[in-house]
Image (cartoon, rainbow, N blue to C red):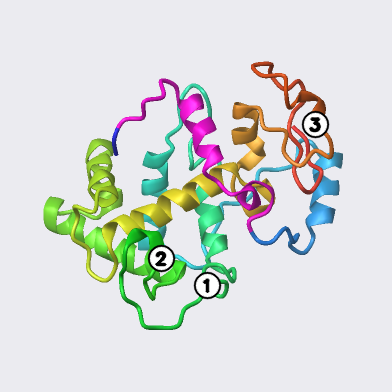
Amino acid sequence: MPESPLTTRRGFLRAAAVLVPASALAGCEGGTKPPGAEAAAGSAASAPHAAPQAAYKPRFFDAREWAFVEAATDRLIPADSEGPGALEAGVPEFIDRQMDTPYAHGALWYMQGPFQQGVPELGYQLKLVPRDIYRLGIAAANAYCSKAYGKNFDALDAATRDSVLSALEAGEAQLDGVPAAVFFGQLLQNTREGYFCDPIHGGNRDMAAWKMIGFPGARADFMDFVNQNGKAYPYGPVSITGERT
């Protein structure tokens, strides 16, 4: 992937947040709360030292696909001194949970043929829905890595993973069943969404991404601070469930 002209990770992620739809920040699944969300919020407020959550078990991805998602998102947003990476923020969990939504099934898209690739201005023209893009893309990317390096993607070192991701982004890697750039774009967009979404959807664990860029979250009123350019927001973010940091 080409090096960002922004000099700090915080600056890059602040700019990336602009590319994430508002629905991804406040609620990627239509703003609905899963069963027990209110009770969970109350428990979090009354038990600040609750026991750590059990490790998440993916529902859509199999073990090999899950290893790819974890390895790839870790390289797209790695942890450093300024904040947590995609793994610490729960991005893989977010992506897996999104695969059970109408969005991932293409229910919100027009999916009737003919499927003919036209000029970019016409937008997405493939017959693949997000679930298909991931399933075909991961298998094809692992096959590409096995042929080129003798290992699946997750078994490669960090530098080689970056080279593979760069080849996918540029469309230089030849994948069977799905265009490499389409697969990379889907993965990158969902990684951004998972990093900045409301924690109710599995990503942005502990609202760490919001704290890092100074985003207030689902606060009812922060307009007094909108035009105070350069001034840090003095209060921590709030999630949809009412959880505070």
Tally the marks.
3
Q: Earlier in the sequence, mark 3 or mark 2?
A: 2
Residues at marks 3 and 2 touching, judged by CB atoms closer than 8 Å: no
Q: Alpha carbon of mark 2 to alpha carbon of mark 1: how far?
A: 10 Å
Q: Alpha carbon of mark 1 to alpha carbon of mark 3: how far?
A: 34 Å
Q: Earlier in the sequence, mark 1 or mark 3?
A: 1
The one nearer the camera, 219 or 200, is 219
Q: Which residue is mark 1?
A: 109
Residue drawn at point x = 48 percent, y = 42 percent: 87
Amino acid type of the residue tagged 3 in the rendering: Phe
Q: Which residue is mark 3?
A: 222
19 in the magenta segment: yes
Residue 31, percent across and down?
Answer: 72, 58
Q: Which residue is mark 2?
A: 124
The extreme bottom residue here reads 113
SS at circle 3 = loop
Q: Is residue 154 left or right of residue 45?
A: left
Residues at marks 2 and 1 touching, judged by CB atoms closer than 8 Å: yes
SS at circle 1 = loop
User: Is 19 above or below relative to 152?
Assistant: above
213 in the magenta segment: no
Which quarter of the rendered picture does the C terminus lie within? top right
Residue 134, percent across and down?
Answer: 39, 64
The one nearer the camera, 183 or 95, is 183
Q: Earlier in the sequence, mark 2 or mark 1?
A: 1
Q: Alpha carbon of mark 3 to alpha carbon of mark 2: how far?
A: 36 Å
Task: Examine the image and state in which quarter residue 207 appears.
Answer: top right
SS at circle 2 = loop
Label 1 CA crowd tier, 10 Å (few <14, some 14–19, many 20+): few
